[in-house]
C-alpha cells in the first residue's frame, strides 16, 4: 500500500528535472528511463518497462524526456538514448545504456531486461 501511494506499480512520465529529485527521494529503488520522442528504441523500452512496473511494485518506474532535462543528463553523463538510470537510496548506482546489455538487438525480451535490472539489485529478481 505504501509503495502504491508513492507511485509504484505503474510506469509513468515525470514532467521535469525537479520532479526527478523528489521522486527518487521518496523511494528506495527507482528506474528512470531517459528517452526522446523521436527515438524508436525508446518505444521498445517503454513496452517492457510498462510490464515490469506492474510486476515489481517494490521499484518505482519513471520516464523523463532527455531533451527537457539537460542539467540531469549532463550530471548523470547520459549520452545515449535510451538510458535507464538505476537509482538506489537516492544515488545513481548503475545504468542500462542503449541495448548493449540486452543482447544488442531490438527483439530482446522483457525477461532479459528483468534479469539485467535484477543483476543491479534494483528489483527483487529470482
Image (cartoon, rainbow, N blue to C red):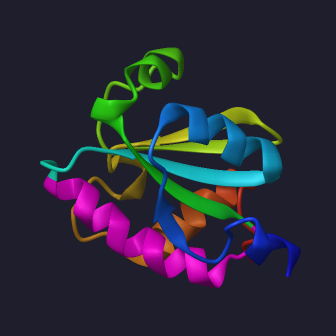
- Residue drawn at x 33%, y 24% as measured from the top left: 79
Q: Position of residue 96 (x, y in %)?
A: 48, 45
Classify residue 121 as left or right of residue 113: right
Residue 94 showing in the rendered view: no
Residue reaching furthest to the right: 2
Q: Position of residue 11 (x, y in %)?
A: 50, 69
**As rendered, which of 99 and 68 lies closer to the eye?**
68
- Residue drawn at x 59%, y 41% as measured from the top left: 19
**As rendered, which of 117 and 75 lies closer to the eye?**
75
Location of the C terminus (image quadrant): bottom right
The quadrant holding residue 107 is bottom left
Q: Position of residue 27 (x, y in %)?
A: 79, 53
Q: Is residue 114 above or below residue 51?
A: above
Instruction: Please name the predominant secondary structure of the magenta segment in the image.
Output: helix
Q: Is residue 71 magenta?
A: no
**As rendered, which of 19 and 73 lies closer to the eye?**
19
Q: Is residue 10 above or below residue 96?
A: below
Classify residue 24 as left or right of residue 77: right
Q: Position of residue 10 (x, y in %)?
A: 56, 75
- Residue drawn at x 39%, y 57% as measured from the top left: 102
Q: Is residue 71 above or below residue 3?
A: above
Q: Is residue 17 above or below residue 8?
A: above
Q: What segment is highlighted magenta in the picture?
A: 40-58
Classify residue 42 as left or right of residue 112: left
Amino acid at each position: 500500500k505504501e509503495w502504491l501511494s508513492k507511485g509504484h506499480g505503474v510506469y509513468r512520465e515525470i514532467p521535469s528535472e525537479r520532479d526527478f529529485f523528489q521522486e527518487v527521494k521518496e523511494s528506495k529503488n527507482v528506474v528512470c528511463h531517459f528517452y526522446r520522442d523521436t527515438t524508436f528504441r525508446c518505444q521498445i523500452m517503454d513496452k517492457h518497462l510498462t510490464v515490469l512496473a506492474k510486476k515489481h511494485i517494490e521499484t518505482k518506474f519513471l520516464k523523463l524526456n532527455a531533451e527537457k532535462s539537460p542539467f540531469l543528463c549532463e550530471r548523470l553523463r547520459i549520452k545515449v538514448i535510451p538510458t535507464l538510470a538505476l537509482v538506489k537510496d537516492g544515488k545513481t548506482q548503475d545504468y542500462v545504456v542503449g541495448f548493449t546489455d540486452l543482447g544488442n538487438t531490438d527483439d530482446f525480451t522483457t525477461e532479459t531486461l528483468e534479469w539485467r535490472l535484477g543483476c543491479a539489485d534494483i528489483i527483487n529478481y529470482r
